[in-house]
């Protein structure tokens, strides 16, 4: 045991071995360090036990412990049961669980067992019926003479919680030697934090709830500080390289605005002031542009791109899907028609000859603005003078991909955009290295979108409602959570719905679009829908971003309870893009009170930030975006809502540490530096070593 350290493979921990190690690996436990930070999901209170012969047979709640002397399983009869006899040397008692067949493989003769519950008498014999129980894996090391909080670990069918508790319990005495401290005593006193080793031990075996809360606060602070240090180092590295200054003057502003067929909103002008102020400096802009669906972010991005072109530099606009990339490219072409600005699109499915021609022109500086998907970060793409990078719906990419695109140029300015309103708590983590601008005003003349919650039993009425709008010349989306059906999940899928919709609406053309279709087919369907030839579009969530069909003012989202609130808000942003009012129908099993309460938020507000806060509260940060590619590891302990004050303190501390010691070369920062690089080097593109 003395030779163990945090990097020791868990199989070398006493009592584990290679078989158990492979089973622990499925739970994410690879090393001894992983094991020590594999914390209980809850604690059960085990009462002090009493001798079995002291039971009277009418106790309302009692606890005993002993050895399993025999077992019995009766699978038939009105009440099938599993039972055992428990003997502690002073006497024996029957323990019975109705419908307890699942216990046959857990409770065996010879096991030490503690049970708690109500005691009764049957045929003059004392018995426990359906009691709480705990297998005592280490009888010699377990104190049964006092109340104790028993840890319950996330377990698997192969590894029970009690076994994990026993293995961790035997290591805890060495925690003081194994766990290094990140901060000196003065730092801990100022922030009222206990020592790290003490906190890890208390997370497994707290003296009481207050001790657990104090330990949790310390370890949550560590998680948040390390995350913010990674972000601070990434930001410092980004802004330390000189960028091309792109100053704006009245002549450039006049020429750009002359290209736009409308007047910008005051909110667009406000964020452009912030963006052009950044672009004028010789340090790279690093800005997040948030704006609700339809608020005009693309025009702002194009303005910034044209400012780069005015200085004879190149701009790249990257989108997560080909549909969205094509949408951006079409708008760029529309606004720049007849100008000398040369634009092109680069996506994955292009013919080799066309692709080579674009790559050559890009490298030679003959293309001013390139729009594309992740194809833009492939190794063959070279720029002549890339000065601005724009990434749309950046949360669909990883932080590493943002770094990869920026490395295509010499410290280019970076603007990332999202129509997913991001709560301040999440913005500090996912986009913590970015300054934030918000477009909080929609262009004038837009119709209002009304959202209604419909029970799925009312689909017939829903179809008639849609038919009425189609007869008035409008178009409709029907959105489904799955592309193809499954026997395991009773959900209508887009492909099946397409067939159904052609039967329900024989007088109207129905189209189908989803992410598994070839790009050429997707483009054809979208052209048909945009032109009005297709009146109904059965779709997967591929329509979530980028589609702009002003005549489509009805949307039906089926199985709406399976979507996140932020995603539903994005989806309904596809309608109401013209002057007419629009209607979004959320079809769900609203008899489920939790689902209906969650979805009702969308019927009460169109404020994307309020919706995002509700979504974050309900689903947590890990699933907030419907993707885990935000470049940050999942938080094990910290909660971005409950620990927001702790997050702010950790952010302030982290940025202060990095400001004073940019290389983390101070001897007192070596432990922190090693842990931060272990967690974030690959994700944030930092160099370990």
Image (spheres, rainbow, N blue to C red):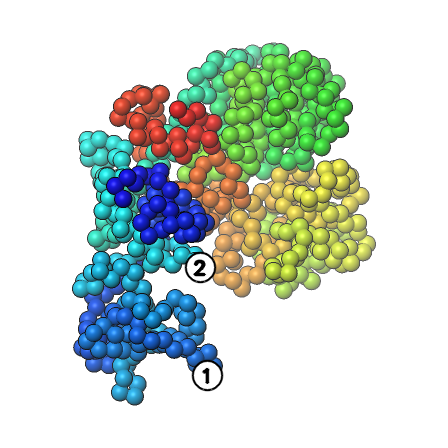
Res. 455 in view: yes
Q: Which residue is mark 2?
A: 157
Q: In the figure, 121 relative to 6: above or below? A: below
Residue drawn where x is 45% and y is 19% of the image:
239
Between tags 1 and 2, which lies in front?
2
User: In front here: 137 or 550?
Assistant: 137
Q: What residue do we see at 75% from left, 55% from top? A: 499
Q: Is residue 528 above or below residue 89?
A: above
Mark 2 element type? loop
Disc 2 packing (10 Å; few <14; some 14–19; many ≥20): few
Label 1 crowd bin: few (<14), some (14–19), many (20+), radius 10 Å: few
Q: Quadrant of the C terminus?
A: top left
Q: Relative to residue 202, is residue 446 drawn left or right?
A: right
- Quadrant of the image occupied by residue 528: top right
332 to the left or right of 9: right
Q: Say how many tags the image has.
A: 2
Q: Are marks 1 and 2 in contact (CB under 8 Å)?
A: no
Residue identified by numbered label 1: 78
Secondary structure beneath dot 1 equals loop
Q: Position of residue 441 (x, y in %)?
A: 54, 34
Give the x, y percent position of residue 550: 69, 39
Q: Residue at x 49, y 26 (%)?
A: 287
Q: Position of residue 490 (x, y in %)?
A: 62, 61
As drawn, the residue found furthest toward the bottom would be 123
212 vs 3, nearest the viewer = 3
Q: Is residue 439 visible?
A: no
- Asked if 240 appears above or below 120 in the picture, the reply is above
The quadrant the N terminus occupies is: top left
> Depth check: 186 or 594 in front?
186
Q: Residue 311: x and y, percent?
A: 60, 11
Which numbered disc flags the more N-terminal residue, 1 or 2?
A: 1
Which residue does the image show at 28% across and 39% down from the upper left? 3
């Amino acid at each position: 045991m003395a030779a163990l350290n945090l990097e020791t493979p868990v199989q070398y921990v006493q009592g584990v071995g290679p078989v158990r190690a492979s089973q622990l690996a499925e739970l994410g436990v690879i090393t001894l360090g992983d094991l020590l930070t594999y914390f209980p999901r809850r604690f059960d209170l085990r009462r002090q036990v009493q001798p079995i012969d002291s039971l009277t047979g009418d106790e309302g709640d009692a606890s005993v412990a002993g050895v399993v002397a025999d077992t019995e399983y009766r699978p038939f009869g009105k009440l099938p049961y599993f039972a055992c006899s428990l003997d502690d040397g002073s006497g024996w008692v029957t323990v019975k669980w109705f419908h307890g067949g699942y216990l046959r493989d857990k409770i065996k003769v010879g096991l030490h067992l503690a049970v708690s519950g109500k005691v009764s008498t049957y045929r003059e014999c004392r018995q426990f019926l359906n009691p709480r129980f705990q297998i005592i894996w280490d009888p010699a090391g377990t104190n049964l003479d006092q109340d104790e909080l028993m840890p319950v670990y996330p377990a698997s069918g192969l590894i029970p919680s009690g076994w994990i508790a026993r293995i961790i319990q035997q290591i805890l005495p060495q925690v003081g030697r194994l766990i290094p401290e990140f901060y000196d005593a003065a730092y801990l006193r100022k922030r009222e934090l206990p020592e790290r080793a003490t906190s890890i031990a208390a997370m497994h075996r707290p003296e009481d709830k207050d001790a657990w809360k104090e330990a949790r606060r310390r370890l949550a602070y560590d998680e948040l500080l390390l995350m913010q240090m990674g972000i601070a180092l990434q930001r410092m590295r980004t802004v330390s390289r000189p960028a091309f200054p792109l100053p704006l003057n009245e002549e450039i502003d006049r020429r750009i605005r002359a290209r736009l067929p409308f007047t910008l909103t005051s909110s667009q002008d406000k964020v452009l002031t912030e963006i052009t102020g950044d672009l004028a400096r010789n340090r790279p802009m690093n800005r997040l542009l948030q704006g609700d669906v339809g608020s005009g972010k693309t025009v702002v991005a194009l303005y910034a791109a044209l400012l780069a072109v005015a200085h004879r530099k190149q701009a790249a606009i990257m989108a997560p899907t080909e549909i969205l990339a094509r949408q951006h490219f079409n708008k760029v072409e529309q606004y720049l028609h007849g100008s000398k600005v040369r634009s092109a699109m680069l996506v994955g499915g292009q013919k080799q000859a066309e692709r080579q021609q674009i790559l050559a022109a890009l490298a030679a500086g003959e293309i001013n603005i390139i729009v594309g998907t992740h194809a833009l970060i492939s190794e063959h793409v070279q720029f002549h003078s890339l000065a601005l990078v724009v990434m749309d719906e950046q949360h669909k990419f990883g932080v590493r991909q943002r770094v990869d695109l920026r490395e295509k140029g010499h410290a280019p300015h970076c603007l990332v955009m999202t129509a997913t309103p991001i709560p301040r708590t999440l913005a500090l983590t996912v986009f913590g290295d970015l300054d934030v601008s918000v477009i909080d005003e929609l262009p004038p003349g837009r119709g209002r979108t009304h959202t209604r919650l419909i029970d799925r039993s009312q689909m017939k009425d829903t179809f008639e409602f849609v038919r009425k709008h189609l007869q008035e010349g409008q178009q409709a989306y029907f959105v489904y959570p799955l592309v193809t059906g499954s026997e395991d999940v009773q959900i209508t899928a887009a492909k099946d719905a397409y067939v159904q919709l052609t039967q329900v609406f024989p007088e109207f053309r129905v189209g189908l679009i989803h992410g598994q279709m070839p790009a050429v087919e997707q483009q054809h369907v979208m052209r048909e829908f945009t032109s009005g030839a297709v009146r109904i579009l059965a779709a997967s969530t591929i329509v979530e971003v980028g589609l702009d069909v002003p005549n489509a003012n009805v949307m039906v989202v089926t199985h709406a309870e399976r979507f996140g609130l932020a995603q539903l808000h994005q989806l309904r942003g596809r309608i109401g893009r013209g002057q007419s009012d629009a209607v979004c129908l959320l079809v769900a099993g609203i008899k489920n009170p939790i689902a209906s309460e969650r979805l009702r938020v969308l019927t009460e507000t169109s404020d994307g930030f309020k919706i995002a806060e509700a979504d974050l509260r309900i689903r947590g940060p890990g699933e907030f975006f419907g993707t885990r590619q935000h470049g940050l590891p999942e938080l094990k302990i910290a909660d971005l809502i409950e620990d927001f004050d702790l997050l702010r303190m950790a952010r302030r501390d982290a940025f202060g540490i990095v400001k004073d010691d940019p290389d983390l070369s101070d001897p007192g920062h070596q432990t922190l530096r090693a842990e931060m690089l272990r967690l974030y080097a690959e994700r944030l593109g930092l160099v370990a070593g």
